[in-house]
Image (spheres, rainbow, N blue to C red):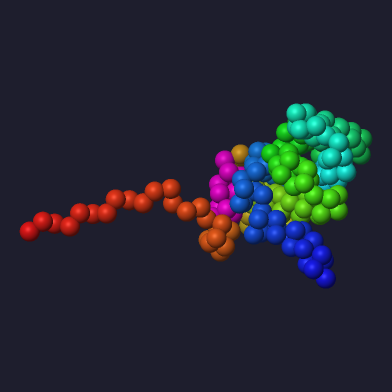
Amino acid sequence: MTSRTSFWTTLTDPLIRQNPVTLQILGICSALAVTTTLATAVTMSVSLTVVLTLAAGIISVIRRHIPDTIRLIVQIVIVASLVIVIDQILQAYFADISRALSVYVGLITTNCLVLGRTEAYARYHAPLPSMVDAFGNGLGYSFVLIVIGTIRELFGQGQLFGAQVLPLADEGGWFTPLGMMLLAPSAFFLLGGLVWVVRSVWSEQAEPPEHSPPLRPEPVE
């Protein structure tokens, strides 16, 4: 029972309380770049989660055989190999989405979230806990991308997954797309707003102030 509870905590904590994007500010480049549509956000989320989970499992299995001097090189080679496989699958079966994602699938190799979990967790734990931790962090990352992608596509085009949801004004409806939502700055502000909301609700995630303002001196009579 204790083991199940531990696995459940490891899996669910990265969703909100230990979210790698809102708490640790990892992987934000893709959060800003690939969330113009919900389809690209979901595809990127699935790709990174699969790579992260498999990489954590493989690195955990061979962790006792990796010399410390080349551990980062080995981890990057494993992650890059998985990314190449995922990229080839996307190009073969989801060509349009692959073109929309452009170079960002390849950049999963250097994503701080992937290397962070393999370096900080998978190197020190057994394969199953490592994969549970990686999958949980992938879900936390996916949650942020899907939320931002939903907002940007819905208010930027009135669509979700390419299907018209809000009736457009130029077609007799009432909604006028907000073109700014499709620009990178909108993702930046949406991500900042999401971080603010999460840290307002879970105040323990807010960093303590780096310094306190000086006290106002009392007037001398």
Query: Residue at coordinates 75% horizontally, 58% vertically from top-left?
Result: 10
- Depth check: give the residue in front, 98 or 213: 213
Classify residue 204 by image quadrant: bottom right
Query: Residue at coordinates 87% horizontally, 40% vertically from top-left?
Result: 62
- Depth check: give the residue in front, 40 or 215: 215
- Residue 132 locus on image (x, y percent): 81, 54
Classify residue 68 by image quadrant: top right
Query: Residue at coordinates 82% horizontally, 65% vertically from top-left?
Result: 3
Does residue 66 lie above or below 207 as drawn?
Answer: above
Q: Is residue 54 left or right of residue 207?
A: right
- Residue 39 locus on image (x, y percent): 78, 47
Query: Residue at coordinates 36% horizontally, 51% vertically from top-left?
Result: 212
Q: Is residue 98 left or right of residue 112?
A: right
Does residue 212 lie above or below 93 as drawn?
Answer: below
Does residue 162 lie above or below 86 as drawn?
Answer: below
User: Magenta region, mostly helix, strand or loop?
Assistant: helix
- Considering the image in quadrants, where does the C terminus appear? bottom left
Question: Farthest bottom residue?
Answer: 1
- Residue 172 visible from this viewpoint: no
State which region is magenta. Answer: 185-197
Q: Is residue 190 magenta?
A: yes
- Depth check: give the residue in front, 56 or 201: 56
Q: Is residue 32 left or right of residue 163?
A: left
Does residue 113 lie above or below 172 as drawn?
Answer: above
